[in-house]
Amino acid sequence: MGDDLHFSVWLALGALGIGLNKGGLTGLGILFVVLFAMALPARASTGLVLPLLLVGDVCAIIIYRRVVVWPVFFRLLPPTLAGVVLGYFAFNYISAKEFGPLIGWIVMALVAVQVVRETLGTRLDRLFHSHVFGAAMGVLAGATTMIANAAGPVANLYFLSIRLPKLNLIGTSAWFFFAVNCSKVPFSAHLGLINHESLHLTLLLAPLVVVGIFIGRWLASIMPQKTFEWFLLVCTFLGALQLIIPHR
């Protein structure tokens, strides 16, 4: 009974974390990844998380539909979809434990560059706004979301690097992840990750996602721009750390 209680608590907190993340605290994607990983095996966690993410995505794109920066969305989406396809073919050959540390170290290095950038002003802006950088981050995000369900740190770092204002970042992120998560559904279903059991749990946990969205929206609305940026940067660092250090 104790194990069942812990299982239920981790799942409930994970669903709430998805809502907080989709509601505006976009850096908290790391929270639900860790919580679901504590409750379920990697494959089962991936199958449950994706439908719950889509519930949150639909709510988020309705709430933030008017603040999307479409040029950024369309710049990042194609290479990300290419990364999803690469991740699909690599899924049965590369485990999240093997792939995660590599992505984690890359993200950690980019976080360090972003921190240094704060002291250098606009000197590195040309690099971050380049099409090559955007394409590389897109492929990285796509492969990471397919294999390790952890594209948040990569995508958030990109949005931070091009200096999107808070609401624009949240809105663009909402539409971006909605598109990416929709693209993952047929691949995840073919791999057997989404099934009747995962969809049943989705229906049970979906209300907690919605509750978390409204809480996250309120918290994001009262957070100043600079505080929001540093919050996102710290969460990205923690997300990279989680990918590097095994949690099982």
Image (tube, grey):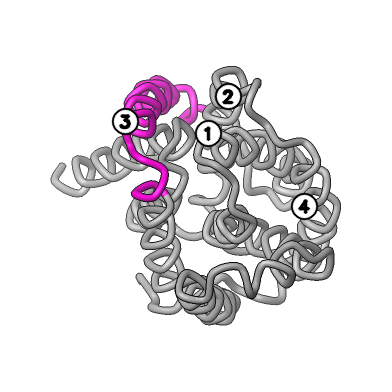
**Which residue is the site of mark 1?**
167
Inspect the image, locate mark 3, and give the three-letter code of the amino acid beneath it.
Ile
Local SS, label 3: loop
2 or 3: tag closer to the N-terminus: 2
Inspect the image, locate mark 1, and give the three-letter code of the amino acid beneath it.
Leu
Residue 194 image point, x, y percent: 63, 41
**Which residue is the site of mark 2?**
64
Inspect the image, locate mark 2, and give the three-letter code of the amino acid beneath it.
Tyr
2 or 4: tag closer to the N-terminus: 2
Mark in the foreground, 4 or 3 = 3
3 or 1: tag closer to the N-terminus: 1
Q: CA distance from mark 2 to mark 3?
A: 16 Å
On screen, 7 above or below 174? below
Quarter placement of the C terminus: bottom left
Q: Quadrant of residue 92?
A: bottom right
Q: Quadrant of residue 186?
A: top right
Local SS, label 2: loop
Magenta stretch prevailing secondary structure? helix
**Which residue is the site of mark 4?**
76
Q: Quadrant of residue 233?
A: bottom left
| Crowd around label 1: few <14 · some 14–19 · many ≥20 (10 Å) | some
Of residues 131 and 196, the one nearer the viewer is 131
> Bounds of the magenta span?
200-228
Q: Residue at x 71, y 36 (%)?
A: 69
Q: CA distance from mark 1 to mark 2?
A: 8 Å
